[in-house]
Image (cartoon, rainbow, N blue to C red):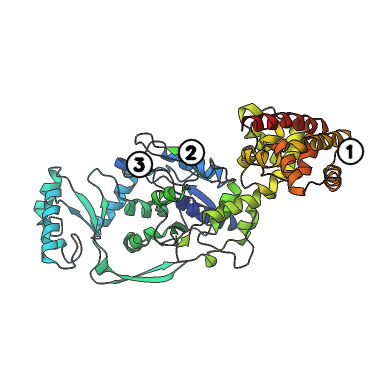
Amino acid sequence: MSTTVRTRYAPSPTGFQHIGGIRTALFCYLYTRKMNGQMLLRIEDTDGSRFVPGAEEYIVESLAWCGIDLDEGPHIGGDYGPYRQSERKAIYQKYVQQLIDAGYAYYAFDTSEELTAMRERLQAAGGSSRMYDAASRMDMRNSLSLPADEVKQLLDSGAPYVVRIKVPIDEDVKMYDEVRGEVVINTKQVDDKVLLKTDGMPTYHMAVVVDDHLMKISHVFRGEEWLPSYPIHVLLYRFLGWEQPKFIHAPLILKPDGKGKLSKRAADKLGFSVFPLAWKHPIKDESSSGFREDGFFADAFINMLVFMGWNPGTTQEIFTRPELIEAFSLDRMQKGGAKFNFEKAQWFNQQYLQAKTDEELADLVLAAAPDAHKDADKTLVTKAVGLMKERMTFVKDFWENALFFFGEPASYDAKVVRKKWKEERIPLFKDLENRLGKLEEFSGEKVEKTVKDFIGETELGFGDVLQVFRVMLAGTMSGPSIFEMASILGREEVVCRMQSAAQAFDAMKAEA
Ligand code: GLU
């Protein structure tokens, strides 16, 4: 095994990559970069029947969005290719033959009817024996149970077969996982898995071991769901005479209540996505939104994701990319499942958003502007962003809550108008409009002083004035500081809006 750290992210293009996969890729990436190693992408597409068009492109795009850059892969090349298992079919054959010749694997000729009959017999017998294991394999039709000449004849006649691993009887297989330490499984619990399928393609077990060896992988990062397959892989390394890489099984990502895996269905119900990017299935009538489309910054997404199975051992929560690479270590990975918390994900985004300068945020806000506001004035947007920022979690929040900066309100809060726009007060608001119209320095502070002085000189209460003033300018009761808002709008605009609003309020009263 090479002393250089070489890792791989090895997804199957059988669907759209769940955030759990991206999280595994992230751990792999952080460790690789920390160790100055190389990381490759390998597409595990040995199961042609489950191939989903576009799934590989989706993986590549998701990794790129997350800034998980790779050193080798099907889309960039490298010295250890091909990087798609479907293009490596001929490579595996040799090693399967080596296993058969050494007595570690055997041909199995059972038809699917025979397998079904056997399954039924075993079920009826009620024992613990599986269809293919050390206890039952001699009852099946394979090169261990049949006479040699019959085996030869079957092979020569082109009879369909699979190749299975011959798991030793009653042996404790020791497996080491960097997160869990040593795990021991007795081979009584391991069945004779298929290594080579009838179509001549290897199964995952065979391909993963051969490829990790040939691609000189030093550390295998994969999800906890592969832990039960680990004994097969340990045996294959031994049978092929190869030193095995180190294994790191990342914990499952659980539903927020900790009860079971976080699936698309569970997340749909809770109203969030479990995918990095939005997708639409090319054949089935299925689609999903993604964190990117939902407005998450890639860095915030990554920062949230790294805590799904790792912690720095300190109270620090926000990490830049270099800090994450520096801080990441295998010994701080957790074994237990990681509960997903969407509120926390939003919190991370908010932290990243708040950390941006008003200028940076204004650029993002402008890039996300609806058509009607594509040409909005950058200076105005920058000022407005400065005021709105602390109430924003996503860039899109700006356009949902700050339209009043770009034009008169389309409607006014009817309740406030009904309760506060009284006949006798109309001249008072005209007075306020005149005072503001004369104000030379139209700063937030000066507007505030003018409004407050005005309140002091009248019989009106704060609520009577401020609510009306706010609705005049913004249409609604929610929003940032009304004085700062007025200052950003500017004197002329404020006066104009007060006039239009007064007319609209009168009309609303008349209609009521
Ligand atoms: N191809 C497997 C998957 O898609 C990956 C297992 C591994 O990384 O070894 O989950």
| Residue type of the residue flagged with mark 3 | Ser
Distance, label 1 to label 3, CA atoms, is 72 Å
Distance, label 2 to label 1, CA atoms, is 59 Å
Visible in this render: residue 481? no
Q: Quadrant of residue 235?
A: bottom left
Say which element carries label 3: helix
Q: Which residue is denoted by mark 3 in the rendering?
A: 86
In terms of sequence position, does the residue under pointer 1 or pointer 3 come before the other?
3
Q: Count up the numbered dots.
A: 3
- Horizontal side of 143 relative to 173 (left or right) equals left
In terms of sequence position, does the residue under pointer 3 or pointer 2 come before the other?
2
- Horizontal side of 80 relative to 166 (left or right) equals right
| Residue type of the residue flagged with mark 1 | Glu
Give percent across and percent down for residue 407: 70, 30
Q: Which residue is denoted by mark 2 in the rendering?
A: 75
- The residue that appears at 40% across and 57% down in the rendered structure is 261
Label 2 crowd bin: few (<14), some (14–19), many (20+), radius 10 Å: few
Checking the image for residue 137, the label placed there is none
| Residue type of the residue flagged with mark 2 | His
Q: Which residue is denoted by mark 1 in the rendering?
A: 441
Between marks 1 and 3 in the image, the one whose residue lies nearer the viewer: 1
- The residue that appears at 78% across and 39% down in the rendered structure is 486
- Horizontal side of 267 relative to 363 (left or right) equals left
Between marks 2 and 1 in the image, the one whose residue lies nearer the viewer: 1
